[in-house]
């Protein structure tokens, strides 16, 4: 009778022979090494699955009690909402959160994947990022699920994601200003290559079109979701000869920049200029005037993403989970009817 170890050896040797590779290549695939081509990895994993090979889980293969949360940058206010959401769910499941800052808003740095393979978290929550196919394959080979939060682009069909109703948020913000009587309404959003930026602008356009209001192309500005970007774009808008009477900012941080630009020009908010933000960060209710904004459930988005990644670590759903949480308008003191 063969021992389990010899059974494994025979199985792996047969797979290596059929795949036309060495046993060391089989070992590299099983250990998630990067120095294996995507085609070879797919062929080997397919043969292993066909033969019903079950990798024994030992100390080297055991996952840590971690959820990895990955940002491309940390904003001290906005990021904390997501962190708190992920952390609360992780704690309830006896897990810890490791925080990683890597890459751009589209993808982590290439060396990030090597660190993940060493840390072996239960799952990964990516913020504003896509994953290259080869990274997804390596993580899949280790059964490490990934969930993307508010994706920067259009995520691949097989990547689970949690977002919010950005189009509805942009629509609600702009309709509020229209209902107050504003007709010259500008919008400052985030980067032009981010899906959430474009969706919020699409909501703005839909509200303006539905009201039969003209949209001056110069009234739509793309920024970076930061205070400085909001300030610089607002300066351009407010220095125009036919300046807007209201500005919809695609983030509360950009709205802070709009308020600064208005103060520089001696404009009073909301008497001379109405301002609507987006996110409803805690600071929004402490500003003077308090900021009218679109509430984006950032903490709940973190909670849902963490819950989903934990569930995906235990089961494989029939379809890829996608979730968009509702947004809502929060009216405060930074908006009012335009001056007559």
Image (cartoon, rainbow, N blue to C red):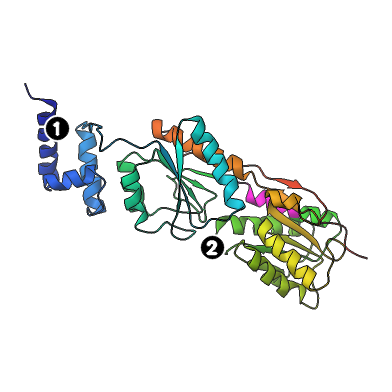
Would residue 68 be found to the left or right of residue 26 on screen? right
Where does residue 68 sit, x and y in percent of width and height?
A: 43, 44
Residue annotated with mark 2: 193
Q: Could you say whether the residue bearing mark 1 is in a helix, strand or loop?
A: helix
Where does residue 102 sit, x and y in percent of width and height?
A: 44, 57
Tag 1: Cα neighbours inside 10 Å, few (<14), some, or many (≥20)?
some
Tag shown at residue 8: 1
Would residue 87 be found to the left or right of residue 232 on screen? left
Whichever of callouts 2 and 1 sits on the residue coming sooner in the sequence is 1
Residue at screen point 24% across, 40% down = 46
Where does residue 130 sit, x and y in percent of width and height?
A: 45, 53
Tell me if residue 77 comes above or below residue 315 in the rendering: below
Tag shown at residue 325: none
Q: Farthest residue toward the top?
A: 1
Tag 2: Cα neighbours inside 10 Å, few (<14), some, or many (≥20)?
few
Residues 8 and 39: in front is: 8
Residue at screen point 39% across, 59% down = 109
Q: Could you say whether the residue bearing mark 2 is in a helix, strand or loop?
A: loop
């Amino acid at each position: 009778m063969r021992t389990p170890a010899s059974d494994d050896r025979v199985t792996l040797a047969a797979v290596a022979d059929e795949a036309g590779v060495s046993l060391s290549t089989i070992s590299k695939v099983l250990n998630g090494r990067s120095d294996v081509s995507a085609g070879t990895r797919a062929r080997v994993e397919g043969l292993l699955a066909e033969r019903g090979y079950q990798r024994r889980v030992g100390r080297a293969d055991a996952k840590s009690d971690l959820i990895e949360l990955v940002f491309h940058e940390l904003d001290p206010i906005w990021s904390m909402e997501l962190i708190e959401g992920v952390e609360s769910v992780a704690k309830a499941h006896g897990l810890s959160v490791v925080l990683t800052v890597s890459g751009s808003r589209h993808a982590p740095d290439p060396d990030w994947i090597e660190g993940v393979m060493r840390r072996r978290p239960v799952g990964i929550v990516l913020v504003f990022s896509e994953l290259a196919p080869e990274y997804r394959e390596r993580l899949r080979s280790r059964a490490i699920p990934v969930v993307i939060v508010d994706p920067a682009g259009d995520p691949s069909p097989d990547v689970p994601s949690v977002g919010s109703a950005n189009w509805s948020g942009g629509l609600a913000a702009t309709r509020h200003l229209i209902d107050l009587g504003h007709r010259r309404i500008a919008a400052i959003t985030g980067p032009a290559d981010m899906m959430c930026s474009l969706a919020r602008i699409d909501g703005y356009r839909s509200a303006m079109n539905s009201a039969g209001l003209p949209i001056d192309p110069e009234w739509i500005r793309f920024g970076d979701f930061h205070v400085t970007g909001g300030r610089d774009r607002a300066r351009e808008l407010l220095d125009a000869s036919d300046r807007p009477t209201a500005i919809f900012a695609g983030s509360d941080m950009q709205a802070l920049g709009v308020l600064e630009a208005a103060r520089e020009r001696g404009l009073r908010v909301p008497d001379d200029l109405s301002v609507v933000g987006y996110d409803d960060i805690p600071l929004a209710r402490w500003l003077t005037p308090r900021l009218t904004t679109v509430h984006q459930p950032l903490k709940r988005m973190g909670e849902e993403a963490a819950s989903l990644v934990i569930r995906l670590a235990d089961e494989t759903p029939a379809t890829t989970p996608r979730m968009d949480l509702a947004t809502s308008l929060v009216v405060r003191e930074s908006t009012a009817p335009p001056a007559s």
